[in-house]
Image (spheres, rainbow, N blue to C red):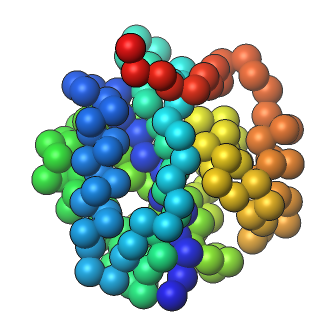
Amino acid sequence: MESAYVGIGSNIGDKIDNCRSAIARMGRLKGCSVKLQSPFYRTEPVGVEGQDYFLNGVVCLDTDLSAATLLNHLLNIETEMGRVRRKKWDARVIDLDILLFGSQIIEKPDLMIPHPLMHTRRFVLTPLVRIAPGLIHPILCKSVRELEEALPLKGQAVEIYERS
């Protein structure tokens, strides 16, 4: 079994239901179980303008799948939930990204682990710190807490989500 950390995000429709549905679907994958789940955070879109805020979180899956097989399942979940890929960083019903897969380093055209931008994104690191603060980035050799503390706050607002 390997521990896979998956980032979850949504900024279209009922964001909380989208994220919860994606987590439930991941938990039903053969060879996967949801081990840990972060709280959800309301986050500022990063790298784009004119989009609604996101709801983000992170789950840890225990899995006996390969990283490539898990990625294919995650892409299928996105498609089943109505995600249409038009352009990079477009608004989305659901976004599922493998952030870390054990301590593996994978560099393939369609799969990069650790996620190449995770250390620059507060919307990834804040929920990840809540479930695994001592987790070490296998390339940067720093804990996710250290990486989060090094990020600027400006342009990356993250606040705990409370449903009203």
Q: Percent position (x, y) of residue 5? A: 54, 63
Q: Percent position (x, y) of residue 69? A: 33, 79
Which quadrant of the figure has residue 70?
Answer: bottom left
Q: Percent position (x, y) of residue 51? A: 38, 17
The structure residue drawn at horizontal position 61% and vertical position 43%, both measured from the top left corner, is 127
Which quadrant of the figure has residue 116?
Answer: bottom right
Q: Nearer the viewer, residue 13 or 23?
A: 23
Task: Work out whether residue 121 can be spotted.
Answer: no
Up-down relation of residue 2 to residue 98 (above or below): below
The structure residue drawn at horizontal position 85% and vertical position 60%, both measured from the top left corner, is 142
Q: Is residue 139 left or right of residue 32?
A: right
Task: Work out whether residue 32 can be spotted.
Answer: yes
Q: Percent position (x, y) of residue 26? A: 31, 63
Q: How many marks?
A: 0
Q: Is residue 122 left or right of residue 36?
A: right
Q: Nearer the viewer, residue 113 or 19?
A: 19
The structure residue drawn at horizontal position 75% and vertical position 71%, both measured from the top left corner, is 138
